[in-house]
Amino acid sequence: MAAFLALTLLTLSIFSSPTQAEIFTSIGQMTDLIFTERELVKSLKEYIEAEELKLEAVKSWANKLDTLTHASTSDPEGFLAHPVNAYKLMKRLNTEWSELESLVLQDPSDGFISNMSVHRQYFPDEEDEKGAAKALMRLQDTYKLDSESFSKGKLPGVRYNALLTVDDCFDMGKLAYNENDYYHAVLWMQQALRQMDSGEDAKTPKADILDYLSYSVYQMGDLPRAIELTRRLVAIDPSHQRAGGNLRYFERMLSKELRDMGRSQQELTDERPIQLDTYERPKDYLPEREVYEALCRGEGIKMTVKRRSRLFCRYQDGNRNPRLLLKPMKEEDEWDSPHIVRFLEALSDEEIEKIKELAKPKLARATVRDPKTGILTVANYRVSKSAWLEGEDDPVIARVNQRIEDITGLTVDTAELLQVANYGVGGQYEPHYDFSRRPFDSNLKVDGNRLATYLNYKDEPDAFKTLGTGNRVATFLNYMSDVEAGGATVFPDFGAAIWPRKGTAVFWYNLFKSGEGDYRTRHAACPVLVGSKWVSNKWIHERGQEFRRPCGLTEVD
């Protein structure tokens, strides 16, 4: 078995290739790996069976020859006195031992290695593993889940149980540590230590966990706890190359802090386990991070009784559009201002499956436009894969485009292609605008709370210049799957959260009738906690809408 493990590791290293990256950004594409792994398990079992048959044959030879040599060595001359025995000895050593040698030299692993080489090109790479690990940390932050929730599989809406071992937790913490993310390194190393202290077996030495944990805690500014953990490390490994030096350094630092505060004795170390709120999570580039994540959890939604009284449902016939007269769309108000509506039964199950079928081969990592260069590039704040479908690709796409035009009353002749997106592990798209922003107008009347948000983000005045169709006037978003947990579309500016419902679509205007951008429509796709989220977007542009949505007379009309 040891030889097999070595062989497997060698095979993995030989066939490792960085050609397949960013698999983690699409659950739809990750499903193919499930069947790849099943095929490899089948190949592995065949290899084991071949090895067992080979070993049984060798054992049979050994047992037979053991009995024979026991008799022959007790009286060699007497044994060889029989001519048949003399003949068979010559035959065995000349022929049969050579056959046994050939049997031992046979390598049943050839088929397994060949199968591995075929599938290896589709394997995730190191960046995929890192991306998936960071996704778990993102979910941990957004939904305020402690490490034990993931380790023990305590997630809402899960259908299958999945556990993280001590070694898994250690690897998560080590990845965060290597990224200088000591906040998450502490959380995951603490979980690894907790599971090990409870008796769980692991390959990772406890000294390694304590080493990473103690230094990460020090980086979070908790000297007393860093000293306590380092003392534990010294106790189990007195010869550790860093522990002794770190302990003396931490103790000197703490003594200096106590002197500076005019105290001569340190307080007792906090013995409570490290939790999510033990240390403050570092701030990042997103000013509305707390509001955005609270909405993702369903907190802070500003749906008042008064606002709810202004929301209605109705049948929408597209201003007596012939295609909607006999079967009008069911329309529900999701928000009053800005007005956001949801259309029910916007897509059938058959249409959804056809769209997904067409999109899957074309899925590629979703990109964003760099405001400095104008070039499309991938970004950590948008984790999904997308594909663009034309009406000519299939009658279903043409039918969906026509339906969007009928429902909204806006032409789709100048709209972008239908974009299909599938979100992967922790898939998200952080707060963003769908429309391109021109330099901020100081005369525009906005409240003080919004001004800081506007000025924090780069302008993109020429984002759609090459299209020649003007700005994105409206967004039509189809939900093509239910999501067990997470995945809401949220609007941090006015505190709205819209949850995915398969077959429905939501619609809003990004621009006022004056052509000015409605900055309130800054929105986000929350990380998918459990499930696979499929959506399709239709961004409708200004050109061609001159008589369908005439200009307003005021700036924010």
Image (cartoon, helix red, strand yellow):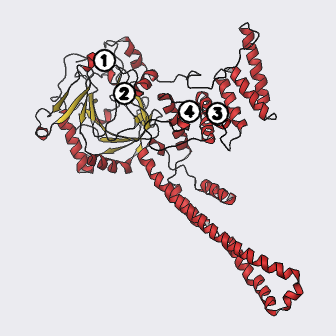
Which comes before the other along the chain, label 1 or label 4? 4
Q: Which residue is mark 3?
A: 194
* Gap between marks 1 and 4 measured at Cα: 35 Å
On screen, residue 501 above or below 355: above
- 471 and 99: which is toward the camera: 99
Q: Which residue is mark 4?
A: 147
Q: Is residue 352 visible?
A: yes
Relative to 468, is 456 on the left or the right? right
Q: Nearer the viewer, mark 1 or mark 2?
A: 1
Relative to 382, is 351 on the left or the right? left
Q: Which residue is mark 2?
A: 490
Q: Quadrant of residue 474?
A: top left
Amino acid marked by disc 3: Arg
Badges 4 and 3: C-beta atoms under 8 Å apart? no
Label annotation for residue 304: 1
Circle 3 — which element?
helix
Which comes before the other along the chain, label 4 or label 2? 4
